[in-house]
Each structure stands twice: as C-alpha cells, then as structure tokens.
Amino acid sequence: MIDANQSIASVVLAEPATGSVFQRYAIDFCTFGTETVAERCRALGLDVGGLIAELEEACVYSDTGEPLSPRSIMELMSEIVATHHEWTRRSLRDLLRTAIKVEQQHPSHGAKLGLLIGAIEQTDELVRWHLAREERELFPALLEKASRRHDIAHELTCMRDEHFLLLGGLRRIRVAADGFVAPPWACHTYRELLASLLSLEIRAQRAIHFESFALMPRLIVAQGAQGAQGARPPRSRL
Ligand SMILES: [Fe+2]
Ligand SMILES: [Fe+2]
C-alpha cells in the first residue's frame, strides 16, 4: 500500500518496479527523492490518486523482486558490483555497437545519429571511470574507514559528485535520442536501440538511487558518532 505522504525515495526503495512509473512522468527519483509523492504531484499538476494507482499496479506486476532487506555493507557493495556495474558496462558496449550499426544503415541521418553516438561514447567513458573508481578506490576506502569509525565525508562527496556527472551523461543521451521517441524513418533496429537506451536510463538511475539511499546511509550509521559531524545522509538531491 503506497501512501501519498511517503517520500519518492522510500517508494522506489521498497518497490523498485515503481521506478518505471515515476520515469514515465519524468519524475527523476534521484533528484526528487526526498519529496513526497503528493508534493511532486502538486508541483506537476498530476492527479495523486491516479499516480498511486499506477504505482501500486507496477508493484503487483513487478518481476524484479529485488530484496532490499538489511545486509552487511560488504554484501551490498558486492551486489552492486556484480549486478549493476557489470550490467551497465555490458549494456553500454552493446548499445554503442548497435548505434554505430544504425548510423551505417542510415547515412542520410548521419549527423543526427553521430550526435547520439557521441553522447553514448561520452557517457560510456564517464561510467567506466566512475565504476572503476568505486571498485578500486571508493568502496574499499569507505569500507575500511567506516569500520574504523573514521570520517567518510570526502568519499561520500566524491560519489555524489560523480553521480551528478553520470546523470548529466544520461540526460545528454536522452536529448540526443529525442526523448527516446522514434522518428518516422526509424528501422526496427533503431526502435530497439531507443527502447534499450530508455531501459539503461531507468536502470542506471535506480543503481545511483540504491547507492545513495541504501548504501550511503548504512555507511554513515557504521561510521558512528564521528560521522554525524562530517557526513550527512542524502538530502535534497542525491
Ligand atoms: Fe556504483
Ligand atoms: Fe556510483
């Protein structure tokens, strides 16, 4: 049962399948996570009852079943790397290959498709850099510092800043892909590419959200009293 006074973040965390409904209404749950469902509906002039009905329907038909029960921080990090990181790397590589294929098939739309390829390439580079940073530097440092109750504010700030960069990359892909709406000349491959790019956006936002609202708070709690001075849980944005 979803309540209109629940924060958007808590709804997506409890039921990841609701992410695609928020996405449909251009409600970026990374940016507006701390607002309640009712507040965002008011801001957008949406019928709150209608949105809640759609959110609840998404829960019923959810096939993700992502368990979000408390687990150790190391387990959370391992799961993030094994699922989100690996999927994102693979997916971006495949999408880039497909976009190049579409460009070769539609030389008359080369300029338009070139922009899209550029946006995917840029985001791919950013994503690979960020994921490697998390795996090799940020996650190990956070784990060690939190367990020793050392200040983790610097690492958390790095993660949030890098997430903003990634969200910017995803927005550039969306713009270059005209909001993932297929033009009349689009072939089957291009239509599939646009659908896959939308899936990438949803899944990447969900991963960032998970790190921001599931992993970071656990780290801050683990860090203990010392962290209460230096680090803060996600607030208005990530
Ligand atoms: Fe990550
Ligand atoms: Fe991340």
Image: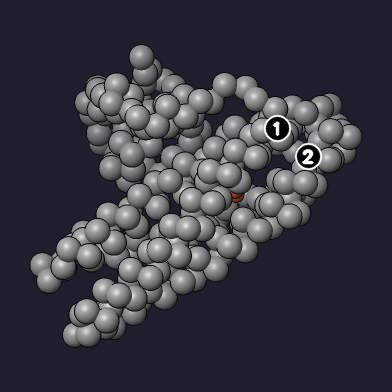
Residue 25 falls in image quadrant: top left
Along the line of sight, the residue nearer the viewer: 83 or 225: 83
Where does label 1 land, which residue?
73
- What number of labels is visible? 2
Q: Residue at x 66, y 58 (%)?
A: 132
Of the residues shown, which amino acid type is indicated by label 2?
A: Leu
Question: In the drawing, does residue 165 fall left or right of residue 109?
Answer: right
Q: Residue at x 46, y 24 (%)?
A: 14
| Residue 225, image x, y percentages | 84, 26
On residue 2, which mark appears?
none
Whether the residue carrying mark 2 lies under 8 Å from ligand 1 is answered with no
Report the residue that reaches farthest toward the top: 1
Where does label 2 land, which residue?
143
Q: For mark 1, does the 10 Å Cα neighbourhood hold few (<14), some (14 to 19), or many (20 or more) residues?
A: many
Whether the residue carrying mark 1 lies under 8 Å from ligand 1 is answered with no
Q: Residue at x 71, y 35 (%)?
A: 74
Q: Can I make out residue 89 in this image?
A: yes
Quadrant in which the N terminus is drawn = top left
Along the line of sight, the residue nearer the viewer: 82 or 191: 82
Along the line of sight, the residue nearer the viewer: 115 or 106: 106
Label 1, label 2: how many angstroms apart (C-alpha)? 8 Å
| Residue 47, image x, y percentages | 23, 28
Tell me if residue 193 comes above or below residue 116 in the rendering.
above
Q: For mark 2, does the 10 Å Cα neighbourhood hold few (<14), some (14 to 19), or many (20 or more) residues?
A: some
Of the residues shown, which amino acid type is indicated by label 1?
A: Ile
Dots 1, 2 in contact, CB < 8 A? yes
Tell me if residue 122 comes above or below residue 40 in the rendering.
below
Q: Residue at x 63, y 49 (%)?
A: 160
Counting residues from the start of the chain, the first of labels 1 and 2 encountered is 1
Question: In the drawing, does residue 212 fall left or right of residue 108?
Answer: right
